[in-house]
Amino acid sequence: MTGPRRRLAALVGRQDGPFSASDLLAAAQRDGLGVGRATVFRTLGLLEAQGAVERIDLPSGDHAYVVCARGHHHHAVCVECGRVTDLPEIEVGLDLAELERRSGFEIEAHRLELFGRCPACRRRPRD
């Protein structure tokens, strides 16, 4: 990893919650990192390939990135505040062997994102 990518990776590690590539570029410019848009996208791709971040698809059709713990897991995304919570696969209760049997597919990978309101947003009255 080059120096600019290392500095950008450190900035990614300080992100609190989901962020877009544009958010990361703005933070990098604010911090004077001197990286361009292409470096941001290439670094996010590298970090995603390494499992350090995951790209999540938002209900709006946009996507964002989140810093992730190692190991396979799923996400619950708040549709109001954007908070992302990791859900271990065991809690989701997916039976991949049964899905393979029923579909005939040999499942190599999967991703699941659940959308709803987080506990904090549920406590607030809706407008």
Image (cartoon, grey):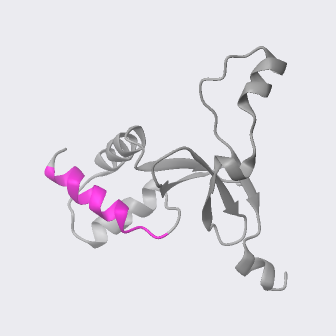
Total marks placed: 0
Q: Position of residue 24 (x, y in %)?
A: 39, 61
Question: Nearest the camera: 55 or 25?
Answer: 55
Q: Which residues are magenta?
A: 3-16
Locate residue 65 relative to residue 104 in the image: left or right.
left
Residue name at image x 70 percent, y 54 percent: 60
Locate residue 80 relative to residue 2 in the image: left or right.
right
Residue name at image x 65 percent, y 47 percent: 89
Residue name at image x 67 percent, y 17 percent: 106
Residue name at image x 30 percent, y 72 percent: 30
Q: Position of residue 73 (x, y in %)?
A: 59, 48
- Residue 4: say if magenta: yes
Question: Nearest the camera: 35 or 59?
Answer: 59
Quadrant that contains the N terminus:
top left
Q: What secondary structure prevails in the magenta region?
A: helix
Q: Position of residue 79 (x, y in %)?
A: 72, 64
Quadrant that contains the C terminus:
bottom right
Locate residue 74 relative to residue 124 in the image: left or right.
left
User: On screen, 123 above or below 48?
Assistant: below
Locate residue 52 relative to residue 110 in the image: left or right.
left
Q: Residue furthest left?
A: 3
User: On screen, 117 above or below 122?
Assistant: above
Query: Which quadrant would residue 85 be assigned to in this image?
Result: bottom right
User: On screen, 121 above or below 94?
Assistant: below
Q: Position of residue 17 (x, y in %)?
A: 52, 67
Query: Which quadrant would residue 50 be assigned to in this image?
Result: top left
